[in-house]
Image (tube, helix red, strand yellow):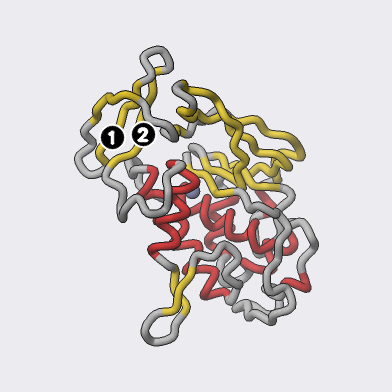
Amino acid sequence: MGRQVALESPNQREGADTQVNCISGNCCHPSTWPAKWDMDCIRCIYCPDDAAILARASQIRVESYSAIIFTDYLFTGGMWTTIEVSAGGFEDEGLIVMDADADCHFAALTLYHEVRHAMQPAGMTTYDAEVDAYTSAERWAIQKGLNDSLGLRMTDEFGNEIPSERAIHDTVMRYYFNTAPDAGTPPTEVVRWLNVETNETQWQNVRTGALEWRPSQEGDYMQTNDVSLTGPGVIDSSEFSCSG
Ligand SMILES: [Zn+2]
């Protein structure tokens, strides 16, 4: 499963008055977008240049919900407890879930991010899968002329806007491992499992795959697949087409 972070304000549109250039016309101009995304603005951003990505999405079940709440585990105050974490979308074995309240830019990015997850080889670590999805989605957004809504870019020595490895690392560590941004690049280990009775955390070395149980520490965090979803629901697959 791969998740997309939730925006703190789902409809934030930084630089909404700035002209940006979609390959296919004026569709990437935020002034043309409804406050909440719909399939018209998604097709407008993707078509015709990214028809292949929409075609891939049409082969996957895509659903849209106004609340996507995961129940995850956090070790705090000497015990494992469950916490509710809002997500901006996720992909899980043939299902893509989008945030119904997001704006067109965020929804378009989420769709790209989640289709990328669906195309990744099996067996990638969460860290590698998320870094790859954020990096490829941000590279695509730069090409489309979409602005830097998630703060994941930098300028290279030639003055080109490129995805920021550091910012993407920090985002992945914060949202997927509840880890402070200065924890190192890349992380050497991540939480794999937990024991609520013995208060132990199982860590996995991301390079070697080695597993080790240790006493849990304040802030240890583990994502689960336990998710609660609230309407509207399934989007017809025929909507994901540039020819309709
Ligand atoms: Zn992801």
Are discs 1 and 2 less than 8 Å apart at CB?
yes
2 lies left or right of 22: left
| Residue under pointer 2 | 191
Marker disc for residue 73: none
Q: Residue 82, relative to residue 208: is it above or below?
A: above
SS type, badge 1: strand
Which residue is more in the foreground, 42 or 58? Answer: 42
Marks 1/2: CA distance?
A: 6 Å
**As drawn, which residue projects farthest toward the top?**
197
- Residue 160 lies, in percent from the top left, at 44, 82
| Residue under pointer 1 | 204
Q: Residues within 10 Å of mark 1 (few under 14, many from 20)?
A: some
The residue lying at 47 percent from left, 39 percent from top is: 1
Please state, as top left, top right, bottom left or bottom right, where the C terminus lies in the image: bottom right
The residue lying at 72 percent from left, 48 percent from top is: 100
- For badge 1, the amino acid type reads Gln
The residue lying at 39 percent from left, 23 percent from top is: 194
**As drawn, which residue projects farthest toward the bottom?**
158
- Residue 72 lies, in percent from the top left, at 52, 30
- Residue 5 lies, in percent from the top left, at 56, 49
- For badge 2, the amino acid type reads Val
Which residue is more in the foreground, 226 or 239? Answer: 226
